[in-house]
Amino acid sequence: MRNAIIIGGGPIGLLCAALLAQRGIRCSVLDARPLEQARRDARLLALSRGTWEILAPALGADVPPRAAIREVLVSSAGDFGATRIAAGDFDGHDLGATVLYGDLLAALAAGVAAQPTIEVLRPVAASVVRQRPDQVEVLLADGSILAADLAIHAEGIAEPTTDGRPETNEEWALLGSVRLRPVRADLPAGAAFERFTRDGPLALLPTPAPFGAGEGRGLSLVWCMNADEAQRRIQLPDQALLGELQSQLGSRIGLVTAVSPLRAVALPRRLRDEVHHHRIVALGNAAQTLHPVAGQGFNLGVRDCATLDDELAHGPPFTDALARYARRRRADRAVITRLTGSLPALFASHFAPLALGRGLGLALLDVVPALRREFAELLMFGVRS
C-alpha cells in the first residue's frame, strides 16, 4: 500500500490524512504536542463556505460547535465608503462559520482515530527529513527512522524565502472577546465586521464561545497594529483600552460595552518560493503564513489539502503528482497572499488619493452586486484551478 508521513497533527495535517486515507494511502501523522495540550488551543478559525464544503465530509458526525457567518460589514475609519456582503447574495447560504481551533482539532482527531490506515503519533518530533530516489526517511527525535513514499510538511510557520531576503515583522494582533451593542437594530445573528483603521485591520467575528453576560452580543476580536502599539495597549487600564477600541470602531458600528483581557500575538508572514522538492511537499502554514485580514490563512491551507488529495488520486509516480500540485496551487497562493499582504497597507495609508480610491472602491462594491459577489467568491473559494 502507498504511504505518506505527515509532519504536523493540527487540523491541516489531520484533514490531509483523512482525505488521503479515502484514496487508499496509509498515513503516519507526527505531532510534537500531546493531544490534550493541542485541544486546549482556543484560537478562533474563520472557515469560508468553500472550506466548510471540504471539511464537512471528512468530519462526518463529529461536527464541532460553530457560529455561522451570515454577513460581513466592511468599512474604513475616516472614509466614506462601506459595503455589506450577505448570505442573500448567495441564495441564503452561509458565507462561512467560525470554530475554535481546539474543537475542530478534537473532531478531526476523533475521525482519524476510526481510520485503520491512519496512525497518529503524539508527542513525536521529526528532526530530519532525508530524500532517497524511491522513498523519504524521517529521523525522529528519539533516533528512530520512519520511511514512506512521500513526506508532507503541515506544521509550523513557513520558512523564509529561499533567496535569503530578510523578513521584517512589525505587526501584532490583540486577541480577545467583546460585547457589542450594534447600531442596527435589525443586525442578524451571524454578522461580522471588518474595520480598516490607520493602525491596521480590526475584525469582530461571531463565535461559538460564550463571553459572560451583559449588554450587547458577544464577538471575538482580532485587532491588528504595530508592535509598539500592541505593547502600549496591552498595558492600558480596562476603561482606557475600551475607549481606544471604541474610537477605532467609530460610531456607525455600535457601542462596545465590555472587553475581555487581551493577549498579544505576533503576526509573522512567510511564503515558501517552492512548495515541493522531489518527494517532499509543504502545505498550510508550512507553505505560507498570512496576515489574518479576511481570515484567509486556514482556508488556503484547506484548499492545499484538497488539491494534493486530488493529484495523488492519480497514483504514482508521486514526484509527478507533487509537481502538478505545485503548479495548480501557484495562482491561488499568489493572489491570496498578495491580497492579504496589500490590504492592510492600502487602508493604513494617509495619502489622500489612496483614501479617496479605497472609499470609492468600497462604495462600488456596495452598489454593484455582481462585483461584490465576485469578490466574495474569491474569499470563499479562492482562485479555482
Image (spheres, helix red, strand yellow):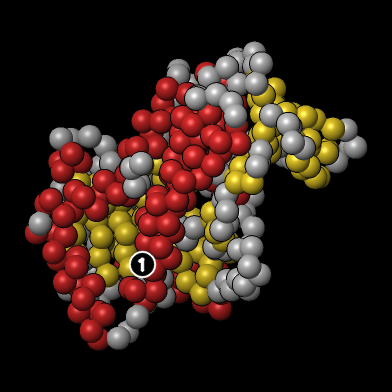
Q: Is residue 1 above or below residue 200?
A: above
Q: Check the image and name the residue furthest to the right.
A: 143
Residue 316 falls left or right of residue 225:
right
Q: Check the image and name the residue furthest to the left.
A: 367
Give whichever of 217, 131 is nearer the camera. 131
Res 6 → quadrant? top right
Residue 220, image x, y percentages: 42, 51
Element type where label 1 sits in the image: helix
Q: Which residue is drawn at 59% across and 73% down?
A: 168
**How many neighbours does mark 1 have within 10 angstroms: few (below 14), some (14-19), or many (20 or more)?**
some
Quadrant location, the N terminus: top right
Q: Which residue is drawn at 41% across and 31% down?
A: 54
Res 283 → quadrant? top right
Q: Can residue 296 be seen in this view?
A: no
Quadrant location, the C terminus: top left
Residue 331 falls left or right of residue 189:
right
Q: Which residue is drawn at 43% across and 65% down?
A: 341
Residue 331, image x, y percentages: 40, 52
Residue 48, image x, y percentages: 36, 42
Residue 375, image x, y percentages: 24, 53
Q: Which residue is drawn at 42% across and 57% down?
A: 334
Q: Mark 1 points at which residue?
A: 343
